[in-house]
Image (cartoon, helix red, strand yellow):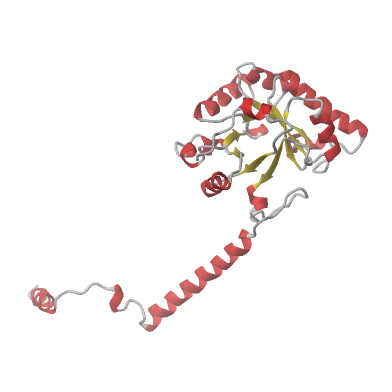
Amino acid sequence: MPRKKPTVADIRANKGKYQYTMMRVESWDELAAAEAAGIDMVSVPPEMLVQQQFRSVAPSLFAVPGMPLYGAPAAREEILAWAFRMMEAGADAVYCAASFKTVKRMASEYIPVIGHVGLVPHYCTWTGGFKGVGKTAESAMAVYERCKKYEDAGAFGVEIEVVPPEVTEAISKKTNLFLVSMGGGPAGDCQYLFACDVLGTNTGHVPRHSKKYADLNAEYAKIQEMRISAFKEFVKDVQTGGYPSAPYIVNAPKSEMEEFRKKMGKK
């Protein structure tokens, strides 16, 4: 039986009852794998979401496109127009790390918005760089207060990234926001990882909270070795007369070829 794509109402009703799974995917193969594997939600590049085949590949996935903050239009009305385009294309919510005023403007148009608290890459210079946030009472309160501001702005949820699990648990009891945990512990309403970390294709920094379930880079290395070996065999075959051989060429009747040569000789 086909899975039903969850709605915002479904997700809110399941708060505290069900742990959703979310994956950042950036290729059609990853998207198809997420659908087949039973992943609930995906973070996707906007350019993928707007493609006509998106929903045929991922009919049951709750899709959340996000525009990088510094790639976003400056004016709130332009961001709103972008969000409308995403929803029209089939998004179920949008990720937005812009100002609370911007979030409120989108929420007022009934666009489900997911914000970002904790380690927010765009703003991490304010919290000490790429490291855990909320490890002191003061910084934990700052995370909570940011959540309340998102709540007041009308956001549907927030990604809560790299904070102690106790902080996520305490906040979860004090907010109706959908908490997407990325390194925020099990008290989140959803657990979120990047496909590149899960699949072992990340060649850069591997976050502490990520867990590798496959080593595709090792498999890709084996495949590259096979490519090189096959190409070498081809070169050797060509140089030694092994290719092209009878099975790989087209044959014609001898009589036709003799006639062809006679005609050539008359020219």
Residue 128 visible here: no
Q: Please identify the quadrant where the C terminus is shown.
A: bottom left
Which of the 4 image quadrants contains residue 105?
top right
Position above or below: 149 against 24 = above
**Residue under the image location 78 percent in, 26 percent down:** 147
Residue farthest along the bottom direction in this orientation? 240
Pinpoint residue 113: horizontal percent, then vertical percent: 65, 26
Pinpoint residue 162: horizontal percent, then vertical percent: 79, 41
User: Quick check: 27 left or right of 23?
Assistant: left
Residue 191 visible here: yes
Q: How many labels, in total? A: 0
215 vs 255, nearest the viewer: 215
Position above or below: 102 against 133 = above
Which of the 4 image quadrants contains residue 35?
top right
Pinpoint residue 62: horizontal percent, then vertical percent: 58, 34
2 vs 244, nearest the viewer: 2
**Residue under the image location 58 percent in, 29 percent down:** 92
58 vs 15, nearest the viewer: 15
Residue farthest along the right direction in this orientation? 137
74 vs 104, nearest the viewer: 104
Which of the 4 image quadrants contains residue 44?
top right
Position above or below: 108 against 42 = above
User: Quick check: 154 left or right of 111?
Assistant: right
Pinpoint residue 106: horizontal percent, then vertical percent: 63, 20
User: Quick check: 156 left or right of 171?
Assistant: left
Residue farthest along the top direction in this orientation? 108
